[in-house]
Image: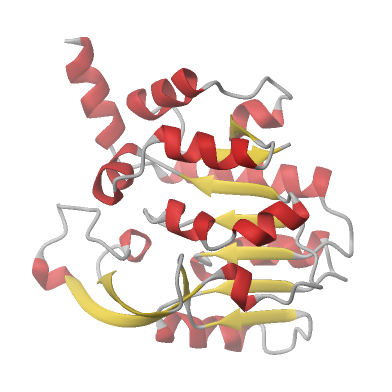
Amino acid sequence: MKDLIKNWARRVPMSNAKNHEYHWMITKLMKEYLNEDSNCIDVGGDKGVLFDEVFSIAPLGVHTLFEPVLESCNQLQQKYAQSTNCNILNAALSDKNGISSFNLSLSNPEKSSFKKVDKMISNGQNQLIFVETVRLDDALSERQHVDLINIDIDGGIYTVLQGASKTIERNRPLVTFRFNTISAEVFGTTPSMIHDYFSLYNMHVYPIQDFVQDKAALTLPELEEHLSDGSCSWFVGHL
């Protein structure tokens, strides 16, 4: 029975209330850790919701948002057309530069991904497109300091991190990211891969709610437990 409950819990879609809670926590972290001239990277822009907060908190910084879907990218470029310190790039972050197929969910855009992570989406609601992929390390100048990387994508988190290794090693930024069991299973990303990645740069992984409350970082078994029971979908990588 316990395993059945865990399996159900980890597959229930995150409610809007939970999304708002995570958004509040990320905003709280930005207010605490960013200065007015901090530079931020947003991966998976969600119509610029987080970017609105970024411009308020760090108005003198240079901010870059990556959006692979052309129509969404065009809308974001129009939205921030008057912002000279904003770069909206029509590309998906990955571990290599090139062109890749991409599953665009027409009914639930936030489920769009390189792979079909939501098996409930029928073929009629899913459109296969091709997008440009870039490594963050290649998309940024080495002279550009990075203070925050927010990764809000459904799966593919590990490939984004692999393509950002030099940037993370050089800057040790605050990294906020979404990670759940369903996308982990589809992409073959294990908790140990995420835990070991950050350990390589002397960084740690925290559930975002624990980081906000200054609690200790997760051990690998604790991260595995969090992922298994679905108790957290947002995490922080930091020193």
Residue drawn at point x = 54 percent, y = 21 percent: 219
135 to the left or right of 204: left
Q: How many discs mark residues in the rendered view?
A: 0
11 to the left or right of 95: left
Residue drawn at point x = 63 percent, y = 26 percent: 210
Does 232 appear above or below 169? above
Percent of width and height locating residue 125: 16, 69
| Residue 239 visible in image | yes
**Could you say which is closer to the camera, residue 24 or residue 120?**
120
Percent of width and height locating residue 107: 25, 66
**Could you say which is closer to the camera, residue 205 or residue 68?**
205
Q: Residue furthest left?
A: 123
**Quadrant position of residue 12:** top left
Residue drawn at point x = 32 percent, y = 59 percent: 111
**Quadrant position of residue 197:** top right
Does 6 appear above or below 157? above
- Which color scheme does this rendered protein use? secondary structure
Image quadrant in which the C terminus is located:
top right
Residue drawn at point x = 60 percent, y = 75 percent: 138
Percent of width and height locating residue 88: 60, 81
43 to the left or right of 143: left
Image quadrant in which the N terminus is located:
top left
**Quadrant position of residue 231:** top left
Percent of width and height locating residue 24: 64, 44
